[in-house]
Each structure stands twice: as structure tokens, then as C-alpha cells.
Image (tube, grey):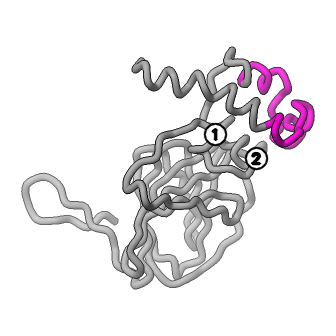
């Protein structure tokens, strides 16, 4: 493993302990909030256990801080612009595009839950293209109820009643392209004519 990455991972535990102590929260309080055992939290803070994405998402939600702040991830991109995560419907959206109008790009994080949520369908104008980076996504669109594994993509018309969440209660990370005008995403590959992904 790269030594710089090792240094980042080694600093996670002390950073989590400092954050908890600065807020005057006990391990018992944090365990009650997150559903993670006190012993696991203690091992995480002492460095005897490596942080997993699932644990970090729970702690990010409990402390209400961006995931990058928990791990001390270096800032990327233009140092003058830092895109702020948006929390809605219990999920985190990180905007990846800066221009107004047109297609918008987001990284979306659905946190792990002890029990998967029941779908609450909604509609709005536009078209969405989703690519699952990790976890297992449950997508309900109209009468269709599908499970989308990591490294798979799906697109749908958002004017149809839809909902998305975790299929198994685990954390899900995905990339989202959204276009208010309903423009569909197109995949170009290989030698030949461009093909629309359906």
C-alpha cells in the first residue's frame, strides 16, 4: 500500500476520537446514535480496526460532517472552489458540475441502515442516468422494481413515479446525471455508430 495512503488511514482513528471528544460525546452515546458497538468504535478510534465505508457513513451522518473531513482527504480540483455536500432525504449529494442549466452531475451516497426503507415514490420533470459505484441499489420506477449491482448503469424518465434506496440496508454510492429537459445519456464505444443506452 502507498505510504501516503497508509498515513491517511492511520490518521482516521485519532481524528474520530478528537471529533467525538470535542463534541463531548461518549462512546456509549455514539453507539446509541449509530447502532455500532462501543468496542468497535473504540477499536476504530485506537487504530486497531480500519474504517470501512459503512462505518464512516454512519459517523459522517452522526457528526453531520462531510465524509472527506472524517478521513482528511486532500482537496482536489480548483483550490478556490470546494463543492459542498447537500443532505436531503437522509442521503448525501455531492455536486460535481458547476455550470447552471443543462445536465447536472452528482455523487450520491445512501447511508447504511439496520432495515431498508420502504419506497416513497415521487415525480418531477427530467431524466436521470445512474451508475452504481458500490453497494446494491433498489430502484422503483412505476410498476418496475429492480436491483442494480455495482458497476451497472440505469436510466429513467423522472416524470414516472420513482424511488431509489439500498436494496439490502447497506451503503450505496452512485454517480447521477440529471437533465431537467429530459435529454437521455448516450454511450459511445467501439467502432461504429453511437448507441443509446436503454
Q: Is residue 155 visible?
A: no
Which residues lie in the magenta part? 20-44
Among all residues in the image, which is located at the extreme left?
Answer: 191
Q: Kindly identify the residue that appears in the image at 70 percent across and 65 percent down.
A: 89
**Quadrant in which residue 96 is drawn:** bottom left
SS class of the residue under badge 1? helix
Q: Kindly identify the residue that appears in the image at 13 percent across and 52 percent down.
A: 190
Q: Kindly identify the residue that appears in the image at 43 percent across and 60 percent down.
A: 80
Counting from the top left corner in percent of width and height, residue 4 is at 44, 24
Magenta-drawn stretch contains 22: yes
The label number, if any, that marks residue 63 in the structure image: 2
145 over 22 or under it: above or below: below
| Front residue (pair 136, 19) | 19
Counting from the top left corner in percent of width and height, residue 21 is at 83, 34
Q: Is residue 31 visible?
A: yes
SS class of the residue under badge 2? helix
| Front residue (pair 10, 108) | 10
Within-10-Å neighbours for mark 2: few <14, some 14–19, many 20+: some
Magenta residues: mostly which secondary structure?
helix
CB-based contact (under 8 Å), mark 1 and mark 2? yes
Q: Kindly identify the residue that appears in the image at 49 percent across and 53 percent down.
A: 174
Quadrant of the image containing the N terminus: top left
99 over 192 or under it: above or below: below
Counting from the top left corner in percent of width and height, residue 101 is at 40, 81
Between the C-alphas of marks 1 and 2, the distance is: 9 Å
Q: Which residue is mark 1?
A: 70
Amino acid at each position: 500500500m502507498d505510504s501516503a495512503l497508509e498515513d491517511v488511514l492511520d490518521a482516521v482513528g485519532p481524528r474520530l476520537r478528537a471529533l467525538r471528544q470535542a463534541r463531548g460525546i461518549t462512546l456509549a452515546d455514539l453507539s446509541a446514535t449509530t447502532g455500532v458497538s462501543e468496542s468497535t468504535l473504540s477499536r476504530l478510534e485506537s487504530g486497531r480496526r480500519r474504517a470501512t465505508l459503512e462505518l464512516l457513513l454512519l459517523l459522517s451522518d452522526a457528526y453531520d460532517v462531510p465524509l472527506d473531513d472524517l478521513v482528511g482527504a486532500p482537496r482536489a480540483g480548483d483550490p478556490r472552489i470546494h463543492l459542498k455536500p447537500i443532505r436531503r432525504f437522509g442521503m448525501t449529494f455531492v455536486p460535481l458540475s458547476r455550470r447552471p442549466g443543462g445536465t447536472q452531475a452528482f455523487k450520491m451516497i445512501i447511508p447504511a441502515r439496520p432495515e431498508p426503507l420502504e419506497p416513497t415514490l415521487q415525480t418531477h420533470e427530467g431524466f436521470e442516468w445512474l451508475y452504481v459505484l458500490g453497494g446494491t441499489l433498489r430502484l422503483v420506477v412505476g410498476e418496475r422494481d429492480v436491483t442494480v449491482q455495482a458497476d451497472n448503469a440505469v436510466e429513467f424518465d423522472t416524470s414516472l413515479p420513482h424511488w431509489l434506496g439500498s436494496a439490502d440496508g447497506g451503503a450505496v454510492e452512485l454517480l447521477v446525471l440529471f437533465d431537467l429537459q429530459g435529454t437521455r445519456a448516450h454511450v459511445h464505444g467501439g467502432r461504429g455508430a453511437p448507441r443509446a443506452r436503454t
